[in-house]
């Protein structure tokens, strides 16, 4: 067998399996690719083949992607990349898979077009990145942490304020939370523990394509005391409300607290980019801007946190020990812009402390 990564491609379409296998084998870092038509067959191959990464179609006969993912994690934990379509059902299932431990996902392209064929190059990059993930870090949100998160989710659902009662609240603070690879799972721990009874508005930037950010926002909304939704052009910042940047758009907040979306050039190869959101937030809220940078590859967030720090705001980044990918937090920490570096389960309490510190501070005042 050739040296390099071993990949197991699981898809019920023979055409898709062939296409993906051929493209992956063109990458010199990938040495061997096996295929399986469904989850049942994949589980049989998993033990003997011992792949470095599994790509897993969301919709399959006999055993769907979620079932197969659960079995893989229970039988032989392996980095899994979900391969998803564009339907609402697929995006919802993909978000759930990311919460359950899938490392990343790939939007299934139309390979009959030149653009679709080129998109397969992105899959090879995602597979190589997935191979670097240490699953023990993905699992570091251990049972105790997850139990605490579940308790917060139950309490949050019961105590979620009605939107009409929130709109009378002013805002003392604006929080910006950024994440990428591993972000949906990290957010499912952090967000349910964030308080809705502070005079704080929230902006979320998760690197995802269109459609998936809405599914993620909807899932987080169901488990949080906050009202969380995908941002739309013209939305206004509100205390107790979290707005998520829609996939494919940069999100800014203008001088009146109004959300502005644009399809400008990608920054660090991504759109939405957290840097854009953070820089605009710092201009509006100054020292009353706080931020958290969670797991993710790349350097997005570094320049944005720099702007927040220059305005007198505060930052926290996720510690390497719990990151699926210690990229974005590392970039902030190594640049010297992180006020605190803590494990995932401590992020929400740090943010809450920052909010409390700013409850009486005039907007824009520098510490």
Image (tube, rainbow, N blue to C red):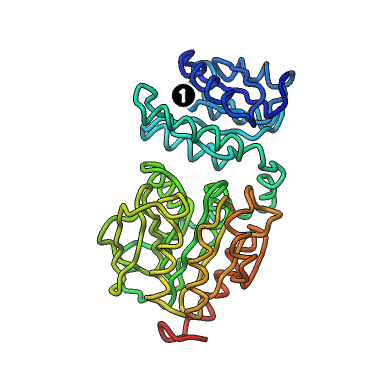
Quarter that holds the N terminus: top right
- Name the quadrant containing residue 284: bottom left
Is disc 1 surrounded by few (<14), some (14 to 19) or many (20+) residues within 10 Å?
some
Q: Residue furthest top?
A: 14
Q: Nearer the viewer, residue 146 or 365?
A: 365
Q: Name the residue at the left extreme.
A: 234
Q: Is residue 129 left or right of residue 217?
A: right
Give the camera-side residue of 275 and 189: 275
Residue at x-position 72% and y-position 29%: 76
Q: Quadrant of residue 118?
A: top left
What is the x, y in percent for residue 70?
61, 31
Local SS, label 1: loop
Position of 97 with respect to 278 (left or right) is right
> As rendered, which of 163 and 338 lies closer to the eye?
338
Residue behind mark 1:
59
Task: Name the spot of residue 110 as percent of width and height, x first.
Answer: 37, 26
Q: Position of residue 271 (x, y in %)?
A: 40, 51
Q: Is residue 360 above or below residue 92?
A: below
| Residue located at (62% from left, 23% from top) | 8
Seen from the viewer's position, the closer of residues 234 and 199 is: 234
Coordinates of residue 170 in the picture (x, y in percent): 35, 76
Which residue is rendered at x = 55% and y = 32% of the image? 124
Where 323 sits versus 125, above or below? below
Q: Residue at x 61, y 54 (%)?
A: 327
All told, the count of numbered labels is 1
């Amino acid at each position: 067998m050739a040296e390099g990564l071993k990949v197991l491609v699981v898809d019920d379409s023979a055409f898709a399996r062939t296409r993906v296998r051929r493209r992956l084998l063109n990458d010199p870092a990938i040495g061997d690719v096996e295929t399986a038509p469904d989850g049942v067959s994949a589980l049989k191959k998993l033990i003997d083949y011992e792949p470095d990464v599994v790509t897993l179609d969301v919709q399959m006969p006999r055993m769907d992607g979620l079932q197969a993912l659960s079995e893989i994690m229970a039988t032989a934990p392996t980095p899994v990349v979900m391969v998803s379509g564009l339907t609402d059902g697929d995006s919802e299932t993909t978000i759930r898979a990311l919460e359950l431990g899938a490392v990343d996902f790939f939007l299934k392209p139309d390979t009959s077009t030149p653009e679709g064929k080129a998109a397969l190059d992105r899959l090879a990059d995602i597979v190589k990145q997935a191979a670097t993930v240490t699953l023990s870090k993905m699992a570091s949100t251990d049972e105790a942490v997850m139990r605490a998160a579940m308790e917060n989710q139950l309490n949050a659902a019961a105590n979620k304020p009605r939107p009409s009662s929130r709109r009378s609240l002013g805002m003392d603070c604006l929080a910006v939370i950024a994440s990428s690879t591993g972000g949906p799972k990290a957010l499912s721990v952090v967000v349910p523990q964030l308080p809705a009874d502070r005079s704080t508005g929230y902006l979320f930037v998760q690197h995802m394509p269109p459609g998936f950010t809405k599914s993620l926002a909807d899932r987080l909304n169901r488990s949080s005391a906050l009202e969380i939704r995908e941002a739309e052009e013209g939305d206004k910042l509100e205390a107790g409300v979290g707005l998520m940047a829609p996939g494919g758009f940069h999100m800014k907040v203008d001088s009146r607290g109004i959300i502005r979306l644009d399809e400008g050039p990608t920054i660090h190869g991504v759109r939405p980019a957290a840097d854009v959101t953070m820089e605009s937030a710092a201009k509006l809220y100054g020292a009353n801007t706080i931020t958290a940078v969670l797991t993710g590859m790349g350097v997005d967030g570094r320049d944005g946190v720099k702007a927040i720090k220059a305005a007198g705001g505060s930052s926290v980044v996720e510690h390497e020990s719990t990151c699926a990918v210690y990229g974005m937090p590392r970039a902030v920490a190594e640049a010297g812009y992180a006020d605190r570096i803590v494990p995932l389960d401590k992020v929400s309490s740090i943010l809450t402390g920052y909010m409390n510190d700013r409850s009486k501070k005039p907007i824009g005042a520098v510490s």
